[in-house]
Amino acid sequence: MIRTEHLSKVYRMGEIEVPALRDVSLEIEEGEFLAIVGPSGSGKSTLLNMLGCLDKPTSGAVFIGGVNTALLSENELAEIRREKIGFIFQQFNLIHSLTALENVALPMFFAGVKSDARIKRAAELLAKVGLRERMHHKPSELSGGQQQRVAIARALSNNPAVIIGDEPTGNVDSETGDAIMGILEGLNRNEGRTIIVVTHDTEIAAHAPRVIRMKDGRLLEE
């Protein structure tokens, strides 16, 4: 489903070049559950941004479903992000003026889903992650773990084939982190969704059947 070929990313800071990825070639099959592990600055989040079409490489290519994303327009990349990929972030990235239900329904608005259908699906997704009784609460009224569950429900709103998590357990305690990974395991096992998670925590990574390690912008081992 997703393939990178000789992927490199260099950030320029004035006259200084900072390599974030160095010649990364990787294949991720449909329905895989993959964890990418490495210390801060290893390039794992940069790689995740490339896989999620949030950034473009300096050289090399990312293929999604056989399509070279480097050849796509910004509108085409936005369509892939909207329809094929669900994102979960460490900081949750919820809109604090909206309820949990409204946060989950929002991506469906941009996808053109009608209001009644948006609300119905958002409620179903929140129930699925154990927040049936909290769907009308705003983020400030929810714990960190509950906010991340809302973020997972939001990531599922447009029924993507791929879920990408950037340190999805980074702002919660270990017990809650295990529960969140359990939800992702269920999405992979029961629904066949491809799950890609970046983490610095080897215990969290152990939930994934496949683990890739990174250092200094390179893949080290599996």
Image (tube, helix red, strand yellow):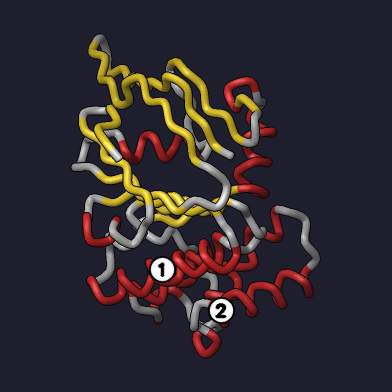
Q: Position of residue 74 (x, y in %)?
A: 63, 30
Q: Could you tell me if residue 96 is visible in this image?
A: no
Residue at 58% from the left image edge and 59% from the top image edge:
192
Image-based side of 212 in relation to 40, left or right: right
Q: Nearer the viewer, mark 1 or mark 2?
A: 2
Q: Nearer the viewer, residue 221 or 39?
A: 221
**Dot 2, how many residues are within 10 Å of its Cα: few (below 14), some (14-19), or many (20+)?**
few
Q: Nearer the viewer, residue 127 or 68?
A: 68
* Marks 1 and 2 close (CB-CB < 8 Å): no
Q: Could you tell me if residue 154 is visible in this image?
A: yes
The numbered dot on residue 77 is none
Task: Give the alpha-carbon distance from disc 1 to disc 2, as whole Å.
Answer: 13 Å
Q: Position of residue 96 (x, y in %)?
A: 46, 67
Q: Position of residue 22 (x, y in %)?
A: 31, 21
Three-letter residue code for mark 1: Gln
Q: Quadrant of residue 21?
A: top left
**Dot 1, how many residues are within 10 Å of its Cα: few (below 14), some (14-19), or many (20+)?**
many
Q: 90 above or below 59?
A: below
Image-based side of 219 in relation to 120, left or right: left
Sequence-wise first label, 1 or 2? 2
Residue at the farthest top position: 15
> Residue tagged by mark 1?
148
The numbered dot on residue 128 is 2
